[in-house]
Image (spheres, rainbow, N blue to C red):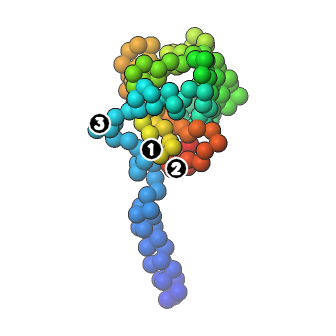
């Protein structure tokens, strides 16, 4: 009996100690009300000619995985792969906003502010088809890098 009580106290101590180690996505999320998104030069450096792998906060078009891979080519082309669906289009940067416009007419042009946490990039939508629309939509890391953020979400 004494052994079970000791185990219970050890388990409770471990559970309460976990938040101190910084686990959980809220520890990594940027505070967009006070932080600045990446500037144009930073966006170019992080996205131009790079492939990002990441996760969305939503599902769409009969796709059952949150994971995606997106290559933003230096020539302005973009290739997006999610599950077994590949989409192509164009990407552009203006100021601190990056926009994606895909060839598939069902995919609406979407623009984002990007915030960095270590080597993790948080995508906050600012518009869809030129209309204001705000919110956290995805997190990514440059392919081949080990994420410095909560790994279950990248």
How many numbered callouts? 3
Q: Percent from the top left, x then y, of residue 38?
A: 41, 32
The residue closer to the viewer here, 20 or 117, is 117
Of labels 3 and 1, the one closer to you: 1
Q: Percent from the top left, x then y, of residue 154?
A: 56, 43
Residue that appears at 55% across and 47% down: 147
Query: Which class describes the residues within 10 Å of circle 1: few (<14), some (14-19), or many (20+)?
Result: few
Q: Report if the CB atoms under discs 2 and 1 are less than 8 Å apart.
A: yes
**Residue 16 seen in the current view:** yes
Task: Choose the circle earlier in sequence order: 3 or 2.
Answer: 3
For numbered disc 3, what is the local secondary structure?
A: loop
* Residue 64's disc number: none
Q: In this view, does 70 lie above or below 55?
A: above
Which residue does the numbered mark 3 point to in the structure image?
A: 33
Q: Is residue 128 left or right of 49 when viewed as pictured?
A: left
**Residue 152 seen in the current view:** no
For numbered disc 1, what is the local secondary structure?
A: strand
Residue that appears at 48% across and 38% down: 121
Which residue does the numbered mark 1 point to in the structure image?
A: 117
Which residue does the numbered mark 2 point to in the structure image?
A: 148
Query: Which class describes the residues within 10 Å of circle 3: few (<14), some (14-19), or many (20+)?
Result: few
């Amino acid at each position: 009996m004494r052994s079970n009580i000791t185990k219970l106290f050890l388990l409770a101590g471990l559970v309460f100690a976990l938040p101190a180690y910084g686990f959980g996505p809220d520890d990594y999320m940027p505070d967009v009300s006070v932080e600045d998104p990446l500037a144009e030069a930073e966006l170019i450096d992080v996205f131009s000619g790079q492939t990002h792998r990441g996760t969305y906060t939503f599902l769409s078009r009969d796709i059952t995985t949150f994971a995606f891979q997106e290559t933003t080519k230096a020539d302005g082309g973009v290739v997006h792969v999610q599950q077994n669906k590949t989409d192509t289009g164009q990407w552009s940067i203006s100021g601190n906003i990056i926009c994606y416009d895909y060839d598939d007419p069902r995919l609406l042009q979407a623009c984002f502010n990007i915030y960095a946490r270590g080597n993790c990039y948080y995508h906050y939508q600012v518009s869809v088809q030129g209309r204001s629309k705000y919110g956290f939509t995805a997190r990514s890391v440059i392919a081949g890098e080990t994420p410095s953020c909560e790994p279950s979400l990248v």
